[in-house]
Amino acid sequence: MSNPKKRILITGGAGFLGSHLCDRLVAQGHDVLCVDNYFTGRRDNVAGLLGQKNFEALRHDITWPLYVEVDEIYNLACPASPVHYQFDPVQTTKTSVIGAINVLGLAKRVKAKVFQASTSEVYGDPTVHPQTEDYRGNVNPIGPRACYDEGKRCAETLFFDYWRQHKTRIKVVRIFNTYGPRMHPQDGRVVSNFIVQALKGEDITVYGDGSQTRAFCYVDDLVEGFIRMMATGDDVTGPVNLGNPMEIPVRELAERVIRLVGAKSKLVFRPLPVDDPLQRCPDITMAKDLLKWEPTVALEDGLVKTIGYFEGLLRERGEI
Ligand code: NAD
Ligand code: UDP
């Protein structure tokens, strides 16, 4: 193993992204502590790791302080899908803001490096396209997405204040739409919704006219970006965009999913949610320069793997 063994805390470790990160870091031989309150995460996501000597799972809500000795912290705890983060918006803001204070306090005390899973939502409904890290965003502070967007913006503020004030070693990445196995089948995100609907032969719910765009990154690519970011020198703080710059209208995504599943589903059009960004696509020049990182998995290949995952899950549950 090239890396020395580290003690690594992953908050939100039983979620979609967190569980893939746990897999990678456990496989590298690190001691991994997964902390999660299981709001949107599932124990099944990390069940395969529970027998491993270098993996531990703890039920804990990060709005409460945690005292553990670790070398690195990945802060991923926060519901990520609009349906879930709007379910209890006050708790979403608390998780982002108080959670950030708690992980930063811990990082300061034990002198750990701390990584923040921020989001493209800090750019709101962007007026600059594609989004570069110096774009300051167009966020509605009082809309239904604000609990998430403003919570994540405030978390970034806290990270940079701890860095300026306490010299805490921070790593902030802004994640753009990511998909793959272990997404929650009911989380309402577009990729999981479309695949589950197609597999069940149901209508595909396109919000608005489907001309709004997103750019989708496969989970393995993203996790590679996380690990490279954490490995950078102390002078690298971010924020760094991580995502796949292959932009596609939502309607076209629906058509691709139908084709790949071989489904007979029809498109049905539903109202566009409030403050739904019209376009989103990362400029990843900085990630390419700093991390020598760029996505490698093509959308079709990633979708085929994700469809395979949901097919297995739905069959197991007797839903198809
Ligand atoms: P997810 O909902 O699958 O994972 C979030 C995890 O955090 C879940 O396991 C959940 O139970 C846990 N959690 C929530 N509140 C908590 C709390 N108070 N204390 C402890 N655990 C808590 O979502 P994900 O897609 O894996 O996202 C992980 C992180 O990445 C989030 O911070 C999210 O904002 C960020 N992100 C994800 C995407 C994406 O496309 N997946 C895009 C941008 C940002
Ligand atoms: N969307 C859709 N149908 C769905 C779910 C989502 O058309 O069943 C749209 C949604 O309005 C948005 C895009 O797909 O324009 C991505 O939505 P998602 O919730 O995955 O993430 P967002 O990028 O909005 O945070």
Image: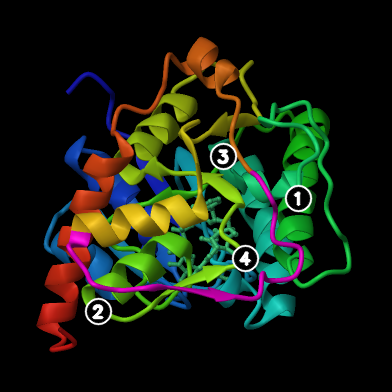
Position of the C terminus by quadrant? bottom left
Q: Amino acid at mark 3?
A: Val
Q: Quadrant of residue 308?
A: bottom left
For residue 20, side relative to residue 167 (left or right): left
Q: Amino acid at mark 1?
A: Gly
Question: x, y (%) of residue 159?
Answer: 72, 41
Q: Quadrant of residue 43?
A: bottom left
Q: Is mark 3 within 8 Å of ligand 1?
A: no
Question: x, y (%) of residue 231?
Answer: 44, 23
Q: Which label lies toward us, 2 or 4?
A: 2
Residues at marks 2 and 4, CA–CA distance in whole angstroms: 46 Å
Q: Tell which circle, 2 or 1, labels the residue nearer the N-terminal end.
A: 1
Label 3: element kind: strand
Q: Residues within 10 Å of mark 4 (few under 14, many from 20)?
A: some
Q: Do callouts 1 and 4 mark residues in contact (Cβ within 8 Å)?
A: no
State whether residue 186 is above or below residue 53: below
Q: Which residue is mark 3?
A: 114
Q: Do callouts 3 and 1 mark residues in contact (Cβ within 8 Å)?
A: no
Q: Which residue is mark 1?
A: 124
* Helix, strand or loop for the magenta stretch, by majority: loop
Q: Which residue is mark 2?
A: 201
For residue 70, side relative to residue 286 (left or right): left
Q: Which label lies toward us, 3 or 1?
A: 1
Q: Coloured how? A: rainbow
Q: Quadrant of ligand 2?
A: bottom right
Q: Tell which circle, 3 or 1, labels the residue nearer the N-terminal end.
A: 3
Question: x, y (%) of residue 103?
Answer: 61, 53
Residue 279 visible: yes
State whether residue 66 is above or below residue 290: below
> Magenta residues, as a range?
261-279
Q: Which residue is mark 4?
A: 65
